[in-house]
Amino acid sequence: MRGPGLSALGPAGFASAVTAGRLIGQARAAVMTPRQLLVLGAATAAAGTLIAALAGSVPVALAGIVLAGLGTSVCAPTVISVAGAAVPAAHQGAAVSTVTTIAYLGFVIGPAAVGGLAALIDLRTSLSVVAALGLALAAGAAVAALPER
């Protein structure tokens, strides 16, 4: 397989991994703290993105993209849950909607930013920056004051 068919495997693999990761993540959330889940998810996403960035072949790049999807899948729901748990009940709606809005902005702007940086420099560097952001999220979650449930 070559060309567009092969290119379509990236987004399809990522989306499939996110779906599987959400299901697995839901089960993991019952036995892990939000901190553990967020650190694990962000670190996994960073590792997958770095694998994709440094891949010397298409299969390795696709494997990295799938791994990134698995890790990413638990980050947004965990951050949204933590936002709601971190504030008094009267402010939960505002906290969750604020975090969700920021997440959606990232969802819309992120791909364009990655593509823009790739056009300016190269795709490896652009994806490496995304991996670094994932590591920053993992490190931040490891030291942040997060609710335990």
Image: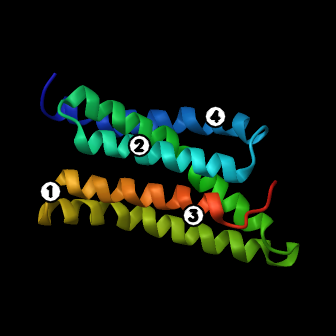
> How far apart are the two marked residues, 3 and 2, measured between alpha carbons?
16 Å
State the mark number for residue 37. none
Query: Residue under circle 4?
Result: 23
Position of residue 125 in the picture relative to residue 70 (left or right)? left
- Display coloring: rainbow
Dot in front, 3 or 1: 3
Residue 54 % position (x, y)? 23, 41
Tag 1 and tag 2, C-beta contact below 8 Å: no
Q: Disc 3 residue type? A: Gly
> How far apart are the two marked residues, 3 and 4, measured between alpha carbons?
25 Å
Position of residue 74 in the picture relative to residue 6 (left or right)? right
Q: Disc 4 residue type? A: Leu
Query: Residue under circle 3?
Result: 140
Which quadrant would residue 84 be assigned to in this image?
bottom right
Q: Disc 1 residue type? A: Asp
Dot in front, 1 or 4: 1
Query: Residue under circle 2?
Result: 47
Secondary-structure class at tag 4: helix
Secondary-structure class at tag 1: loop
Secondary-structure class at tag 2: helix
Query: Residue under circle 1?
Result: 122
Which quadrant would residue 108 be assigned to in this image?
bottom left
Q: Vertically, is 1 above or below 30?
A: above
**Dot placed on the residue nearer the N-terminal end, 3 or 1:** 1
Residue 69 % position (x, y)? 45, 41
Residue 107 % position (x, y)? 43, 61
Residue at image position (44%, 66%) is: 106
Dot in front, 2 or 4: 2
> How far apart are the two marked residues, 2 and 4, measured between alpha carbons?
20 Å
Q: Between residues 11 and 30, which one lies in front from this camera angle?
A: 30
**Dot placed on the residue nearer the N-terminal end, 2 or 4:** 4
**Dot placed on the residue nearer the N-terminal end, 1 or 4:** 4
